[in-house]
Image: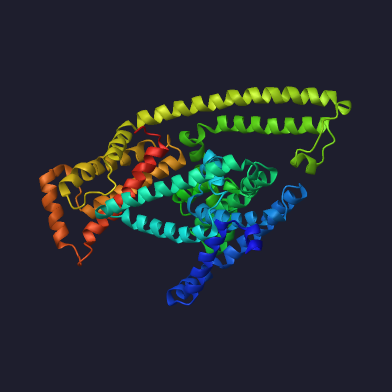
Amino acid sequence: MDALQNVFNNREIAIGGWVIMIIIVGLFTKIGRGFLESVLPIVFGRKFVVFYIIFLSFFSLTVLYLYHASFWDLSLLKDTAFWVLFIFVPLFVKTIEDAKDGRFFAKLIKDNLSAIVIIEFILNFWTFNLAVEILAIPIVFLLAVIYAFASREEKTVNLKKFIDGLFVVFGSVVIIFTLYNLIQRPGEILNIKILKEFLLPILLLFMNLPVVYGLALYNTYEQVFVRIKGEPKEHQKIKRQLFRFAGINLTKVTSLRNNLMRATNFSRTAEELKQHLQGFEKYLNTRLGDNYMKRARFYILSCILMIIICLSGIIASNSTVGLKDLMTFNFVLDIAKIKQIVTYVLSTGLAISICFLIYFIGFRKRKYEEISQIKKFALHDLLLSIKYQNRMLQEFPPVEDPQKLFAQYISIIYDIKRECDKAIVTYDNLLTNWELETLKQLQTYTSLLISTIGIDDIECYSAEEFTIFFNDKKTTAIQNEKINIFISDIERDIKKYSDQIKLCMEIFKVST
């Protein structure tokens, strides 16, 4: 046990023990074996195996690079394995589902550089006694499961509040315990070894971003290629033509996927496709929403690149620094060997680049504010309806009270649907690709909810008339002792609709 505790902390041992126990029990149950039989063929499919090989090869090179830079050693093997299992594997799934453009990667980097990462690292550094951890893990897990179920129904809201209180108490105990250890034993966390453990996940993420980007690119191309029409003998030529058009630009590939009918126009041959893609290129170039910020982003990236080049040149000109020394900050300036001309030029370039970077960040902010104001003016009625609906959203929609449902949801949904239809048709060119997709998704969910309700024009109904209609439909719907299909469909559609309203509030930065 002592040898185990030298490698893993008590929380990791407790979690590992419970996970192993659950896996062993699962293997001896019919449900567990059935789950494995259905999942394993997917996880180890041919395309996934190819990706695993590519990732492991690239990942091995990054670890080898860190090893030669004297950053990585065997003491970080556990943290490296944990990163692959608990960070990269979920990121693999998330990339397939959500990666559509640079915004996904910008958010990914921002999340991993936020202050909460430091706080989580410190809170998880010190653990309780092993017996306490072994007891606490299943209790916390059980409470989390109960909390998830309690959050689904209004009648269990008191149980949800009670569990909220328990989590607050538990969190307070962890924080107090951490602060006590931080004050009493600061040397345990304030050292180079722990700094490396903290920086390792960030470095691994940044260094493996090309693989993540490649996965997103491959996944999006697959969605395009699977919808290819035309003669079978032309398929390979069409694929090559599409790749020459979009290249490794994920945003462009996503635009191609979202507008495949417009881009290809049912091309039967590669030559036909080439002509249609030229027209689609002109369409993309005229999209104000996608192109308005391009120049500002280009200027900022150029300044950052110049700063990196100038800093690297100054260090190289003023010291005898090897790659290993550079990575570990183990170098001393040698004034005697200063190369004056290079140093002066690069120093001037560095100063100018920093000044331009500051200016272009402000320039980008101004351009963003300009286009945002134009969008808010153009979409004023839609955003006003979304803002009003967001205020009316309830944690538990009143599906058992048709009058409240009418006032808080139904009467607003039709207004949003109408404004959404108008905005998509009228301001397609003004919106960015992801903003347009967000509105199209909102349009889909409002249409789905309206279809479930079964009323084409709500203006013909008052609250009382809607109540009569709703109750009649509820009565005639298929149902059993627990579930009414009509009510269940309404709840499902309102949940999707509510989530999309919140997403629109976030995307368009509507003030609450």
Within the image, what quadrant is residue 58 found in? bottom right
**Residue in the picture at 24% in, 41% down:** 412
Residue, far right: 336
Is residue 430 rendered to the left or right of residue 487?
right
Is residue 438 rendered to the left or right of residue 95?
left
Front residue (pair 47, 267): 47
Within the image, what quadrant is residue 324 found in? top right
Residue 460, x across and y down, in percent: 14, 44
Q: Is residue 251 visible?
A: no
Residue 96, x across and y down, in percent: 51, 55
**Residue in the picture at 32% in, 46% down:** 498
Residue 2, x across and y down, in percent: 64, 62
Image quarter in which the C terminus is found: top left
**Residue in the picture at 36% in, 30% down:** 378
Within the image, what quadrant is residue 361 found in? top right
Residue 259, x across and y down, in percent: 45, 48
**Residue in the picture at 74% in, 41% down:** 327
